[in-house]
Image (cartoon, helix red, strand yellow):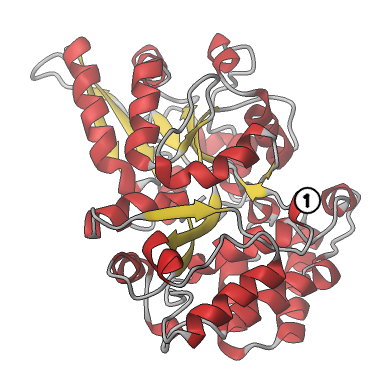
Amino acid sequence: MKKTIAILSAGVLSLSLLAGCGGGEEDSSDGKVKIEFFHHKREGMETIDKLIAKFEKENPNIDVEQASPPEPSTVLRTRVSKSDIPDIIGVGGDMTYKDLSEAGVFADISDDKSLEKVQPAYVQMLKDVSGLEEVYAIPFATNAVGVIYNKAVFTELGLEIPKTWDEFIEVSESIKAAGKTPFFHTYKDAWTTLPSFNALVANTQGDDFYSELNKGNILAGKRYKEAAEKMVQLTEYGHKNQQGVGYNDGNTAFANGEAAMYLQGVWAIPEIKKANPDLELGVFPFPATNHADEVKVISGVDLILGLAASSKHPEEAKKFIEFLLEEENAKQYIQEQNSFSALNGITQDDPSVADLKASFEKGALTDFPDHYIPTGVAPEKTLQTLVLEKDVDAFLEKLQKDWEKVQDRK
């Protein structure tokens, strides 16, 4: 999930704050019903604009206003605290979803027939992250973290896609020896540490990590050591000034051939292609361990469609949600955004992600670990310090202590 870091504290929110609020209003000048769709997918605004135009043509009595401001999670938190809640909210299937659900922001849709369109695994992810049996949003789009690579560079150097961590490092050494940069890191934006972190942690933390967490046992200080060490190792194969470059510049730099690989999610592909439509790129599973058959691709709910319990126009809002769930429209979204669909039978056929297809087909998938890290821990900031100072023990100690502090407040 790209930029959404859990930022809402359920303890700060209360149902009393939410009474009587709603984003949509009726415009008396033209008689149309106005509803607001607030989401965190800023890179998807152009696609959503197209879908809104199509919907409004079919429903001339409804105007849909799209909102996706910078720092959307912070803006959303502020709006919720002021009882100014959008009609439809699109965030990731993470702690923000959990906090909003617990606070009563969303309408309960557990019995909604639209959920029958969704792959059960993604519905279960929402239940797992929230700890609730009720479902408060429809999983719409999903994503994946992998290694985006420049096919021309791999061909030029005679490199094969690495299947294990050791092979990954060998490929990096070969690229470096050829005078090229293996990875382009964008650590100026703290959140860009998370794709690598998620892939490494998910494949190394142990199968019982979450079951132990549910018992109150936080194991991050021990179980995250291998992932942290590998994060530090990857910095050795980056360019100079890794802390001075942000995400947007990284997309452009990779598009212009300044690195052979880019440790990002598939959400970066449309931006890379905008910068260089002729670039031949692919995405392979992040080879986080030396057990190739056990490596799982990180794929989580990237965009939910949640109906506000307080919406003044729930019928119109639900109508727009149902419109987005129609096969043609859901397919348009994932095709233009290079994402994956949470809906049954809708596949991503773009050749750039063909190397991930086998993992999806055999179910070698797992959710984003940072979706389960509670609000207030901010792992991206601690990771930003890790890749700068390269002190693994300090990183583990801080993350463990921060997590314990938040846990103790509950």
Q: Tell me the residue at 36%/70% (across/down).
A: 250
Query: In x, y percent, where is residue 14?
Result: 59, 40
The vertical placement of 277 against 225, above or below, is above
Q: Tell me the residue at 43%/84% (across/down).
A: 239
Which of 232 and 314 lies nearest the eye of the viewer? 232
Q: Tell me the residue at 38%/83% (across/down).
A: 244
| Residue tagged 1 | 294
Query: In x, y percent, where is residue 398?
Result: 72, 78
Query: In x, y percent, where is residue 373?
Result: 69, 57
Task: Tell me if I can see residue 108 in this picture.
Answer: yes
Please state if 363 lies on the left or on the right of 91 as rendered. Answer: right
Query: In x, y percent, where is residue 229?
Result: 72, 79
Please state if 102 lies on the left or on the right of 33 as rendered. Answer: right
Disc 1 packing (10 Å; few <14; some 14–19; many ≥20): few
Q: Which quadrant of the figure has residue 313?
A: top left
The vertical placement of 153 against 47, above or below, is below
The vertical placement of 135 against 410, above or below, is above
Amino acid identity at mark 1: Glu
